[in-house]
Image (tube, rainbow, N blue to C red):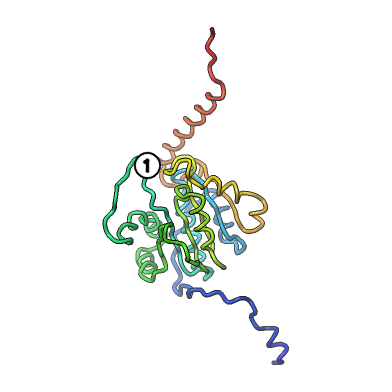
């Protein structure tokens, strides 16, 4: 082999420190996804996609979808780990106060959703193995400064409960070969009120320029609810009520004098 050919074949791309990929294939359960959810999956699995923002009603399977995509990318040896990030903001009408124990003890209640999704998607033995191998790592947003996530699937849940600065902190932790999923519900699951930065985040990154750079936005409605028939019925009634209320507010009653 000539010296010139060897030089041509050398990998001159920058070295990115990454963890080894999983060796055992994950047996991922399949679901009957809605058309919009299928589009989400196709977009997420595309190699050029860097970040997906999902805004949707309760029960539209935002966390399940993101977890499903990350596990599939781990199977394809594109990602090595799943990083689950969530703000430790409690529901505004149900404050528990100070939680005892160390950080792991206090975070376990906030980490239940990702553990549930793993059990929905994988055999229990495999979800346990991923946790034991530290392939699933959970972080509060307040502990992220200085971190660098390369070759990982980063799932930011309940993003509506973050300020804009915190959303920016999470986004800028993402290094090469990673994918970021930012999930929230602006209509019914906002515990920060006006201090939430999620709407501003969506406004900045939902445009054609961002799509050309691998950032995509999806909005899920009542037709995408998968949690249960009961959940779908409840949200349909709420959405119908809100639509009637909004329509009536456009035409205020004028009292005769």
* Percent position of residue 234, x then y: 41, 37
Circle 1 sits on which residue? 92
**Element at label 1:** loop
Please identify the quadrant where the N terminus is shown. bottom right
Residue at image coords 49%, 43%? 186
In the rendered image, the residue lying farthest to the top is: 257
* Percent position of residue 137, x then y: 41, 64
Front residue of this view, candidates 181 and 144: 144
* Percent position of residue 15, x then y: 58, 77
Residue at image coords 42%, 47%? 227
In the rendered image, the residue lying farthest to the left is: 100
* Mark count: 1
Mark 1, other Cα within 10 Å: few <14 / some 14–19 / many ≥20: few
Q: Is residue 222 above or below residue 211?
A: above
* Percent position of residue 138, x then y: 40, 61
Q: Is residue 226 above or below residue 249?
A: below
Q: Is residue 11 above or below residue 187?
A: below
Residue at image coords 64%, 54%? 211
Please identify the quadrant where the C terminus is shown. top right
Front residue of this view, candidates 51 and 203: 203
Residue at image coords 51%, 47%? 197
């Amino acid at each position: 082999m000539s010296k010139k050919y060897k030089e041509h074949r050398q990998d001159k791309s920058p070295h990115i420190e990454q963890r080894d990929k999983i060796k055992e294939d994950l047996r991922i359960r399949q679901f009957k996804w809605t058309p919009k959810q299928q589009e989400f999956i196709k977009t997420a699995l595309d190699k050029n996609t860097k970040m997906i923002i999902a805004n949707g009603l309760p029960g539209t399977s935002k966390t399940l979808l993101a977890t499903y995509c990350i596990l599939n990318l781990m199977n394809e040896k594109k990602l090595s780990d799943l990083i689950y990030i969530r703000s430790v903001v409690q529901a505004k009408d149900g404050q528990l106060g100070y939680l005892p124990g160390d950080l792991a003890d206090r975070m376990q209640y906030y980490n239940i959703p990702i553990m549930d999704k793993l059990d929905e998607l994988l055999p229990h033995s495999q979800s346990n193995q991923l946790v034991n191998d530290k392939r699933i790592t959970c972080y509060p947003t307040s502990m992220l400064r200085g971190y660098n996530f390369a070759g990982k699937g980063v799932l930011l849940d309940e993003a509506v409960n973050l300020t804009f600065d915190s959303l920016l902190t999470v986004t800028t932790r993402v290094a090469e070969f990673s994918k970021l999923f930012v999930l929230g519900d602006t209509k019914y699951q906002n515990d920060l009120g006006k201090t939430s930065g999620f709407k501003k985040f969506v406004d900045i990154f939902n445009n054609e320029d961002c799509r050309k750079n691998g950032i995509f936005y999806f909005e899920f409605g009542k037709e995408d609810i998968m949690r249960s028939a009961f959940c779908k019925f409840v949200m349909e009634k709420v959405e119908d009520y809100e639509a009637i209320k909004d329509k009536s507010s456009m035409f205020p009653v004028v009292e005769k004098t």
